[in-house]
């Protein structure tokens, strides 16, 4: 499909630079593609009234690490040069794939010092500024060093407007995050609080967790003119045997699976058989979902508002229909919804047509 089909006008003032307080006070646009009135304005706090006993929410429990590193590149034939590296996928105890800037000047074999106690060698160099870094430290020792010198890698549409601060270490993390490894938050989950969980528990809505370590590739624009020419960066994920069995049981008894975030949905679809049975799963997924894709798992998707011409807007268009989502986003812009990571949310019902 042509990428320009997924373009839309978005005013700068629609981009949220801070989350609302409390988190569940964010707006929630309910999108029912088959309804006479497909769009309904609610708040995240209304979620219990929009779900049913026996439904199951699926959350991504990945935890954001301070993966933005600033350092000095050294090589024998040249002096030091400032470089930035955003870690995006761990491939070994001492190795990470990263996006480095300025990418063109970095060469294989370069040494980069990210502080007195954290240095790495450029082991491989790929396209688009991607490099493989082999650190001198490994395992927990490397984790501690990164946590000490790293910064939260705010999305570029926020970082270009203000600096990261201490509040972001709290705000850019879900309350249930536990599995360290993401460099971007699964932002749909940022709206949940313990008070909202208590209401959902009282209703009889189940909670289940999967893990997909969101990579910095989620921020990369689609530069191709056609979706068939775009290559997704892979991300590491896990679906446990217990979670797979629980979700299959939900569907068997007529409950609905509600994916909280596109990351949870992409992982569920990676783990599902053709008939929709969810299997225990682990590994790297680069699944790229565009209109025409037949979903096998989630019935409802809760997600924030995404960038024009992004893979995430393509995914939601596949889920609820391109024209439906173009209308939903036009409604969101005209009525003051806040976009992106710290913005408002939507609750999308699947359009199987």
Image: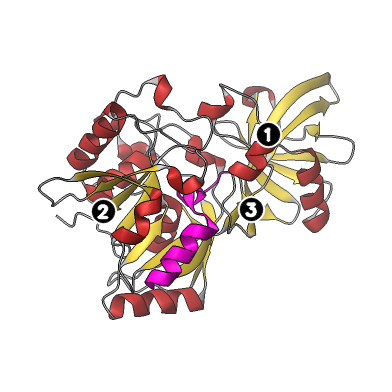
Alpha carbon of mark 2 to alpha carbon of mark 3: how far? Answer: 28 Å
Q: Quick check: is 349 in the magenta stretch?
A: no
Q: Position of residue 224 (x, y in %)?
A: 36, 31
Name the residue at 77% across, 44% down: 146
Q: Would residue 85 be found to the left or right of residue 34 on screen?
A: right
Total numbered badges shown on the rendered structure: 3
Of the 4 image quadrants, the one containing the N terminus is: top left
Q: Is residue 140 visible?
A: yes
Q: Earlier in the sequence, mark 2 or mark 3?
A: 3
The mark found on residue 293 in the picture is 2
* Residue toward you, 171 or 340: 171
Dot 2: element: loop
Q: Quick check: is 198 in the magenta stretch?
A: yes
Q: Which residue is mark 3?
A: 181
Q: Position of residue 341 (x, y in %)?
A: 48, 38
User: Can you tell which quarter of the image residue 329 is in?
Assistant: top left
Q: Earlier in the sequence, mark 2 or mark 1?
A: 1
Against 259, is 17 above or below? above
Dot 3: element: strand
The mark found on residue 257 in the picture is none
Q: Would residue 123 be found to the left or right of residue 207 on screen?
A: right
| Magenta span | 184-204
Alpha carbon of mark 3 to alpha carbon of mark 1: how far? Answer: 15 Å
Does the CB distance between marks 2 and 1 fall below 8 Å? no
User: Can you tell which quarter of the image residue 326 is in?
Assistant: top left
The mark found on residue 85 in the picture is 1
Alpha carbon of mark 2 to alpha carbon of mark 1: how far? Answer: 34 Å
Farthest residue toward the right?
A: 116
């Amino acid at each position: 499909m042509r990428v320009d089909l997924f373009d839309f006008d978005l005013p700068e003032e629609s981009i949220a630079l801070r989350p609302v307080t409390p988190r569940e006070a964010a707006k929630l646009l309910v999108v029912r593609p088959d309804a006479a009135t497909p769009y309904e304005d609610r708040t995240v706090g209304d979620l219990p009234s929009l779900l049913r006993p026996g439904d199951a929410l699926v959350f991504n429990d990945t935890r954001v690490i301070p993966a933005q590193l600033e350092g000095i590149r050294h090589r024998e034939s040249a002096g030091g040069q400032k470089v930035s590296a955003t870690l995006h996928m761990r491939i070994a105890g001492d190795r990470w794939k990263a996006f480095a800037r300025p990418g063109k000047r970095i060469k294989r074999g370069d040494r980069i010092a990210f502080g007195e106690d954290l240095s790495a060698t450029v082991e491989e160099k790929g396209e688009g500024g991607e490099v493989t870094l082999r650190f001198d430290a490994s395992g927990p020792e490397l984790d501690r060093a990164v946590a000490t010198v790293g910064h939260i890698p705010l999305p570029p549409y926020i970082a270009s407007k203000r600096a990261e601060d201490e509040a972001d270490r709290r705000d850019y993390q879900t309350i249930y995050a536990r599995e360290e490894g993401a460099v971007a938050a699964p932002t749909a989950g940022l709206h949940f609080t313990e008070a909202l969980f208590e209401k959902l528990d009282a209703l009889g809505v189940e909670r289940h967790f999967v893990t997909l370590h969101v990579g910095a590739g989620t921020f990369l624009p689609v530069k191709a003119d056609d979706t068939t020419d775009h290559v997704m960066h892979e991300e590491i994920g896990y679906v446990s045997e217990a979670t797979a069995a629980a979700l299959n049981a939900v569907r068997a008894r007529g409950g609905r699976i509600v994916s909280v975030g596109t990351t949870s949905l992409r992982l569920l679809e990676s783990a599902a058989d053709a008939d929709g049975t969810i299997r225990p799963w682990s590994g790297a997924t680069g699944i790229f979902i565009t209109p025409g894709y037949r979903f096998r798992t989630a019935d409802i998707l809760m997600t924030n508002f995404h960038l024009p011409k992004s893979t995430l807007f393509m995914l939601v268009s596949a889920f609820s229909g391109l024209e439906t989502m173009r209308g939903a986003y036009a409604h969101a812009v005209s009525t003051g919804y806040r976009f992106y990571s710290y913005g408002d949310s939507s609750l999308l019902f699947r359009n199987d047509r």
